[in-house]
């Protein structure tokens, strides 16, 4: 019985190590590709969002969450949407494995976080806060409007 628990723990540990290694490798490769990314708002934080026209989760959950964030953060956040079917070379350069995929980029255009699959609004807010972009207070939001 103890042997089975140890084997299970070992397999879980190996799985986690492989996941972390793949995530770091993907961010490293994305960092190499980020130099070719053109942005309209220099110095802002960015979310690079890979989608396809047939992705229902993208249309119903991911896109509305990103639109909400972009309106709340205003000029501090730029969302760049990439259709992976129209730009497969860009998706390959960024090592996109599934849609939706979102990359959180800091002000220097460096990829800091990658979400393979759906990342809800709350998760994205936490990730943006981790790299330095905090939610504007309600008074700032009203003043900007």
Image (cartoon, rainbow, N blue to C red):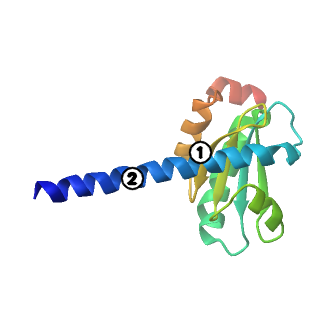
Q: Which residue is mark 1?
A: 24
Examine the rendering and report whether any part of residue 49 can be seen.
Answer: yes
**Image side of residue 130 versus residue 14, left or right:** right
Disc 1 residue crowd, few under 14, some 14–19, many 20+, Cα 10 Å = some
* Element at label 2: helix
Examine the rendering and report whether any part of residue 120 can be seen.
Answer: no
Q: Which mark is residue 14?
A: 2
**Image side of residue 57 versus residue 76, left or right:** left
Residue 122: where, in percent of width, then height? 53, 44
* Element at label 1: helix
Residue plotted at (24% across, 57% down)? 7
Residue 23: where, in percent of width, then height? 57, 49
Nearest to the observer: residue 141 or residue 80: 80
Residue 59: where, in percent of width, then height? 66, 66
* The quadrant where residue 58 appears: bottom right
Residue plotted at (71% across, 49% down)? 29
Is the residue under label 2 in contact with that under label 1 (CB below 8 Å)?
no
């Amino acid at each position: 019985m103890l042997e089975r628990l140890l084997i299970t723990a070992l397999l879980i540990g190996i799985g986690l190590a492989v996941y972390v290694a793949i995530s770091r490798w993907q961010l490293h490769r994305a960092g190499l590709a980020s130099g070719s990314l053109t942005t309209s708002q220099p110095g802002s934080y960015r979310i690079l969002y890979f989608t396809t026209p047939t992705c229902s989760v993208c249309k119903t959950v991911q896109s509305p969450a990103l639109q909400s964030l972009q309106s709340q953060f205003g000029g501090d956040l730029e969302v760049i949407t990439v259709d992976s079917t129209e730009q497969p070379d860009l998706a390959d350069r960024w090592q996109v494995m599934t849609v939706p995929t979102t990359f959180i980029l800091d002000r220097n255009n460096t990829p800091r976080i990658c979400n393979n699959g759906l990342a809800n609004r709350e998760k994205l807010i936490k990730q943006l806060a981790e790299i330095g972009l905090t939610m504007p207070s309600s008074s700032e939001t009203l003043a900007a409007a």
